[in-house]
Amino acid sequence: MTLSNEGIVQLINSYDKQSKALKNEALKLSWYMRGGLSYEESMYLSTDEREMISKIIEENLEVTKKSGIPFF
């Protein structure tokens, strides 16, 4: 497969965007876990594991909102 210069730039930009999204998600997970999961550990999680933890966090935030109990 060969790419034009423009195609290569687009591919690099796509990889950069994906990399930043992964880092952002890992940082959010480690922040919500309050030390229970370090940034480095969150980077080693699979996509499925990150999605599962994110879903648990969302569910807990929703329960917190409904109950009126402070989250922080």
Image: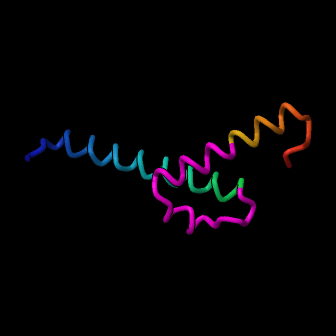
The spot of residue 59 in percent (x, y) is 71, 39
The structure residue drawn at horizontal position 8% and vertical position 47%, both measured from the top left corner, is 1
* Among the 4 quarters of the image, the one containing residue 67: top right
The chief SS type of the magenta part is helix
Please, which residue is most extreme toward the left here? Answer: 1
Q: Relative to 23, is 59 on the left or the right?
A: right
Q: Count numbered badges in the picture.
A: 0
The spot of residue 19 in percent (x, y) is 43, 52
The spot of residue 49 in percent (x, y) is 52, 54
The structure residue drawn at horizontal position 26% and vertical position 44%, both measured from the top left corner, is 9
When the figure is inspected, residue 9 is found, relative to residue 41, above or below; the finding is above
Please, which residue is most extreme toward the top here? Answer: 66
The structure residue drawn at horizontal position 48% and vertical position 50%, both measured from the top left corner, is 48
Please, which residue is most extreme toward the right here? Answer: 69
Q: Relative to 32, is 8 on the left or the right?
A: left
Q: Relative to 14, is 47 on the left or the right?
A: right
Question: Which one is nearer the viewer's eye here, 35 or 64?
Answer: 64
Q: How is the image coloured?
A: rainbow
Question: Which one is nearer the viewer's eye here, 38 or 17?
Answer: 38
- The span shown in magenta is 33-57
